[in-house]
Amino acid sequence: MSFEKQWQDGVQEVSGAFGALSESDLQRLRARCDLLMERKRALQALTARLDPATHCAGCGGACCVAGKYHFARVDLLVYLAAGQPLFAPLFDNGLCPYLGESGCLMAPAFRPFNCITFNCELIEDLLDDEEVARFYRLERELRRNYGEIRSLFPGGSMDRALL
């Protein structure tokens, strides 16, 4: 089965589960998604001042080469809960299918856990000790958020990647 077909099937399955939520579960989901997006923005802000794009250009973005499996079902739920249109992955670009000509197709608040929490040594070495501690505290909180969102759905249906 092609990645495109897997993507479409996954989107349909998650959208169906989202549409079946009760109003109270939908409110709980939105509150958890808002908090998750807030934490992702905070993580991004910690490194944004370091001009990571310059560092990434130096190595060619090696961390993004195999990113197709990082977009989780929970990440799609965040798009749905926020009422945001979903991007179209570029499965034929030879890199991460979420990379376009001008970078990631997702705003920082919507990026997958692995993408928003990964710092190569070049970036992490530029953070001071307090910033590193804050980064890892936010990462733990974000991991907890993902678990809280997954717990709203029965049988581990949101535990894996979309593909």
Image (cartoon, helix red, strand yellow):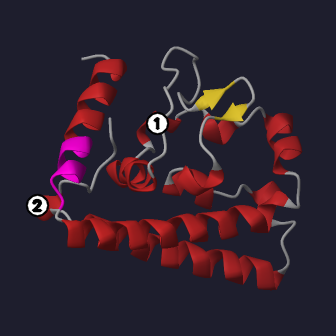
Q: Is residue 132 magenta?
A: no
Q: CA distance from mark 2 to mark 1?
A: 25 Å
Magenta: main secondary structure:
helix
Q: Is residue 17 magenta?
A: yes
Q: In this image, 141 relative to 132: left or right?
A: left
Which label belongs to residue 86? 1
- Residue 87, percent from left and from top: 51, 32
- Residue 89, percent from left and from top: 49, 26
Q: Is residue 140 visible?
A: yes
The amino acid pointed to by label 2 is Gly
Q: Quadrant of residue 122?
A: bottom right
Residue visible at 42% across and 55% down?
A: 78
Q: Is residue 151 visible?
A: no
Residue visible at 88% across and 52% down?
A: 51
42 and 159: which one is in front? 42
Q: Considering only order in the chain, which callout, 1 or 2, is on the residue closer to the N terminus?
A: 1
Q: Which residues, given as a range, are shown in magenta?
A: 14-21
Which label belongs to residue 62? none
The residue wearing badge 2 is: 155
- Residue 4, percent from left and from top: 35, 20
Badge 1: few (under 14), some or many (20 or more) residues near its Cα, within 10 Å? few
75 and 61: which one is in front? 75
